[in-house]
Image (tube, grey):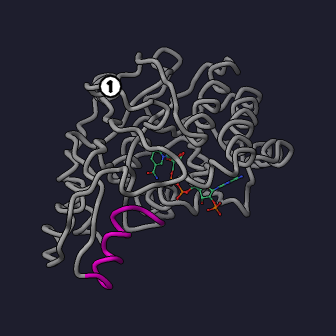
Amino acid sequence: MLNYAKILVTGAEGQLGKCLKILVGKSANIIFAGKKELDITDANAVYSFFNNHLPQIVINTAAYTQVDGAESNRELAFLVNAEAVKNLAETCKIFGSKLIHISTDYVFDGKAKLPYKETDIPNPITQYGKSKLAGEKQIIQSSLKEYAIVRTSWLYSNFGHNFYKTMLQLAKIKKEISVVDDQQGCPTYAVDLANALLDIATKLTKENSGIYHFCNTGATTWYGFAIAIFEKKQIAIGVHPIATASFPTAAKRPAYSVLDSQKLQEVFHLNIPSWEEGLSECISEG
Ligand SMILES: NC(=O)c1ccc[n+]([C@@H]2O[C@H](COP(=O)([O-])OP(=O)(O)OC[C@H]3O[C@@H](n4cnc5c(N)ncnc54)[C@H](OP(=O)(O)O)[C@@H]3O)[C@@H](O)[C@H]2O)c1
């Protein structure tokens, strides 16, 4: 077990928060705070929580993550994903804490043909993506010295709501399903991300602060991901590729949201598993 500095994980009842929890167990010097323990939109509560616990590092997994819901709940999305991130960044500054904040591939418009690098210009096409980009800006504008904004994509695990679990649920009740085959991205096993975040927490300095991309390596479509899930789980089900246009959603999804994680691998000396390896690991741990 690594000897961590005192870490606060916000949004601890979410998918990523739970993955962090199973990795570190109870023994480590880590405080897990769900929304009930710490509502990050409440600036006074955030200050008091820091004052009581004095975290040296904050891993902010708390977010409004309903991509379609954000189209009609714009205010709430911006409150949690931007204003509350400002609260955290300002409070980290006061208490000298480092901030590791999770952001998303949906800050990009999906028009690229090559994996997005940290230097590419964001241009979100959804309210969710806009609110997450606004959160990133709050951290940068706060002039907090030690921070990492880690953009990730297509998170899944055995916890919470995600595509992997949805496919397994559908397989219980359907013999045939249709899955979108014209959106490209990187399915990312949330435990692999959690491992990377804990590693970053031990190595984050003023010098390496900035924006990073983290996803499992390689790329596929939702259809390709579904096929891999059913093959690896040996589930017999008919899977048909469809176009995004046949599956209308409130929020338009980027057609291409593959992230390039090379910078993170080089700066923090991390080896990132492929998305197929991540999936096998998820299945074996499920
Ligand atoms: N899931 C993905 O595919 C994906 C892709 C790219 C990036 N990300 C980013 O990765 C991070 C983790 O995502 P996830 O999949 O773990 O999301 P999640 O399962 O939805 O977890 C987010 C958690 O934050 C909590 N929360 C919401 N408002 C809060 C508040 N005001 N104060 C404290 N906690 C609050 C939620 O509680 P309630 O559920 O009770 O509201 C939930 O437990 C997020 O920053 C997300 O934007 C996710």
Q: Nearer the viewer, residue 21 or 231?
A: 231
Amino acid marked by disc 1 = Ala
274 horizontally vs 152: left or right: left
Mark 1: few/some/many CA within 10 Å (<14, 14-19, 20+)? some
Seen at 24% across and 62% down, the residue is 226
101 horizontally vs 257: left or right: right
- Whether the magenta-drawn stretch holds residue 166 is answered as yes
User: Which residue is disc 1 drawn over?
Assistant: 112
Seen at 52% across and 47% down, the residue is 251
Q: Is residue 157 above or below residue 132?
A: below
- Whether the magenta-drawn stretch holds residue 72 is answered as no
Q: Nearer the viewer, residue 158 or 65?
A: 65
Residue 273 image-quadrant placement: top left
Q: What secondary structure is the magenta-colored segment mainly? A: helix
Residue 229 image-quadrant placement: bottom left
Range covered by the magenta-colored residues: 161-174
Q: Nearer the viewer, residue 139 or 250?
A: 250
x and y percentages locating residue 63 in the rendered image? 61, 49
Q: Is residue 242 above or below residue 149?
A: below
Q: Nearer the viewer, residue 142 or 57?
A: 142
Seen at 38% across and 69% down, the residue is 166
Q: Residue furthest bottom?
A: 173
Callout 1: CB less than 8 Å from ligand 1 = no
Seen at 41% across and 18% down, the residue is 120
SS class of the residue under badge 1?
loop
Q: Quadrant of the C terminus?
A: bottom left
